[in-house]
Image (cartoon, helix red, strand yellow):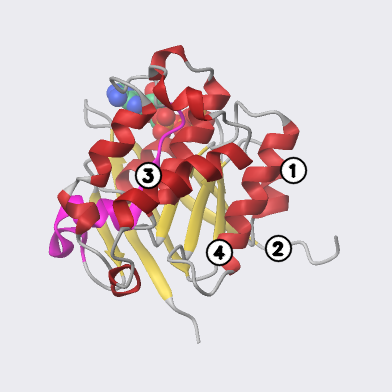
Amino acid sequence: MTETVLEVNDLQCSRAKGDPVFSHVNFKVNAGDIVVVQGRSGSGKSTLLKCLSHMNIYSGEILYRGKTPKSYGIPHYRTRVLYVPQRASLLPGTPRDFMEAISNFGSYNKKSSAERSQSARPRGLSHETIELAEEWGIDEELWDRSWSNLSGGEMQRIALAIAVGMKSAEVMLLDEPTSALDPDSSASVENYLRSQIKASDSNLKALVWVTHSEEQGRRVGNRFMQLSAGGIQEESVDSGV
Ligand SMILES: Nc1ncnc2c1ncn2[C@@H]1O[C@H](COP(=O)(O)OP(=O)(O)OP(=O)(O)O)[C@@H](O)[C@H]1O
């Protein structure tokens, strides 16, 4: 049976001056989906992800498991429908500072039933997260370097490892998550995320993945959408390939 985790109805997002970036955006994300979103530069892909995580003003309706973000409380909602930005360079301090800060974050500590069984989570978070990043080629010493002194690819892998390590998200919104990575690192991240979506014991149920790479889209996605000013179009999967 289809389990809808996110539903978007007639979404419109406008620029500060009022003209819409896009309108009439409708789609559903189901458990097990990796929804690849593509579109021309400036079509609003990042803006769409920010709307989905309630970080941008929008009109229309977004429902997470049938309920509005406000009914969960926005900070709590954002830990469940989690936006992972393309760049974390504007953050102050080091990745380790950031990881410790979110470990103590009230909404993060509001555990889901799956998480409640794990009593020592904050320590586990740090250790597992550092190990995961190590699998992606990140030396532990980089956790103590300021964000602004990390390369784009290091920043991306650390930000993604933190997002995954939180284990709070059911839907992760990925904004070109491997754009600064070499092919091997990118493959490692892709394989890990795909395995998490398939794993029955994972909290992560679906991904919305913005990428400019057609090849990457085909490798990771099971659903494909094109965003433009007039709405979002789902493309049928090419079963002949
Ligand atoms: N903070 C902002 N203030 C004003 N306009 C913005 C802001 N952020 C984005 N925009 C505008 O909104 C539109 C959509 O931007 P967005 O970054 O969502 O596009 P995108 O499809 O993700 O682009 P790209 O593929 O180049 O990353 C663009 O016209 C952009 O200039």
Please name the residue shown 49% across and 62% down the image: 206
Q: Which residues are magenta?
A: 68-87
CA separation in Å, label 1 and label 3: 23 Å
Name the quarter where the C terminus is drawn: bottom right
Local secondary structure at mark 2 = loop
Looking at this view, name the residue that lies furthest to the bottom.
1
Crowd band around label 1 with a 10 angstrom C-alpha radius: few (<14), some (14–19), many (20+): few
Q: Nearer the viewer, residue 157 or 45?
A: 157
Q: Nearer the viewer, mark 2 or mark 1?
A: 1
The answer to which of marks 4 and 3 sits earlier in the sequence is 3
Q: Which mark is residue 94?
A: none
The answer to which of marks 1 and 3 sits earlier in the sequence is 3
Magenta span contains residue 150: no
Q: Which mark is residue 237?
A: 2
Q: Residue type at mark 2: give it.
A: Val
Residue receiving disc 1: 215
Local secondary structure at mark 3 = strand
Magenta span contains residue 86: yes
Q: Which image quadrant for residue 212? A: top right
Q: Nearer the viewer, mark 2 or mark 3?
A: 3
Q: Which mark is residue 83?
A: 3
Do the numbered discs 4 and 1 sit on residues whose CB atoms are within 8 Å?
no
CA separation in Å, label 2 and label 1: 14 Å
